[in-house]
């Protein structure tokens, strides 16, 4: 799916390219970005993560795609759909995003997530889309709520790949049903 792309008014969600590695590494090395996502990543870790999401796209036809701003063709993060691999979203269609700090507060996450949800419900047979984040990640939770996703307090969980005692370990779960999305 090397030529995959979804366009919105201001953004392009697309397959990853080799020249995305450096700007993505800068995003993952920014402590402001990673404050609610996990530890700051070095170049080797961010490159390995990119290889993982590329393998996911090759295997499933979707992933957390590269997120490019049309105005300047800058890579500003990722957004898309994977198969969840933790807690109550394991095996389910999980939407996610990660944006560079200078792209925050401009509606890009919501715009890209809407396009990803449209793609999911047009191309997959899922009854719902799911999202998780650390309990205190208020910015992502606000995006989930703007998308019409419903918070499931009964599905809070301790993320198994985050160490006990880490303040990011507790996670929340949100979802939106296909029927709800189609009525928005």
Image (cartoon, helix red, strand yellow):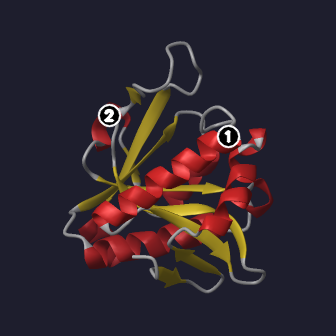
Question: Where is residue 7 drawn, in percent x and y?
Answer: 54, 84
User: Can you identify the residue that label 1 sits on?
Assistant: 34
Q: Which of the 4 image quarters holds residue 108? A: bottom right
Identify the image quadrant of the N terminus: bottom left
Which residue is at a point 54% across and 54% down the rendered structure image? 50
Say which label, 1 or 2, has the lower sequence index.
Answer: 1
Mark number displayed over residue 140:
none
Residue 41 position in % (x across, y down): 67, 38
Establish if 39 lies above or below 128: above
Cα gap from disc 1 to disc 2, whole angstroms: 21 Å
Task: Look at the picture and state if 78 lies above or below 37.
Answer: below
Mark 2 element type: helix
Q: Going by the picture, which residue comes out furthest to the top?
A: 165
In this orientation, which residue lies closer to the viewer: 2 or 24? Answer: 2
User: What residue do we see at 65% from left, 64% from top?
Assistant: 20
Q: Which x, y percent locates residue 166?
A: 58, 19
The percent position of residue 172, horizontal first and vertical second, equals: 44, 37
Q: Does any portion of residue 141 appear in the rendered image? A: no
Position of the C terminus by quadrant: bottom left
Which residue carries the number 2 mark?
Answer: 87
Q: Secondary structure at mark 1?
A: helix
């Amino acid at each position: 799916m090397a030529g995959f792309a979804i366009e919105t008014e201001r953004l392009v969600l697309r397959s990853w390219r080799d020249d995305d590695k450096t700007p993505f590494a800068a995003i993952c090395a920014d402590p402001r970005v990673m404050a609610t996502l996990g530890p700051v990543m070095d170049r080797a870790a961010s490159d390995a993560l990119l290889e993982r999401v590329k393998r996911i796209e090759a295997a499933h036809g979707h992933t957390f795609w590269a997120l490019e701003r049309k105005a300047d063709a800058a890579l500003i993060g990722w957004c898309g759909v994977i198969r969840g691999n933790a807690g109550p979203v394991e095996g389910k269609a999980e939407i996610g995003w990660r944006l560079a700090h200078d792209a925050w507060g401009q509606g890009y996450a919501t715009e890209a997530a809407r396009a990803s949800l449209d793609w999911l419900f047009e191309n997959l047979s899922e009854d719902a889309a799911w999202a998780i984040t650390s309990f205190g990640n208020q910015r992502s939770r606000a995006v989930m709520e703007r998308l019409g996703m419903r918070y499931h307090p009964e599905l809070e969980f301790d993320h198994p790949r985050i160490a006990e005692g880490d303040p990011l370990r507790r996670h929340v779960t949100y979802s939106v049903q296909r029927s709800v999305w189609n009525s928005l």
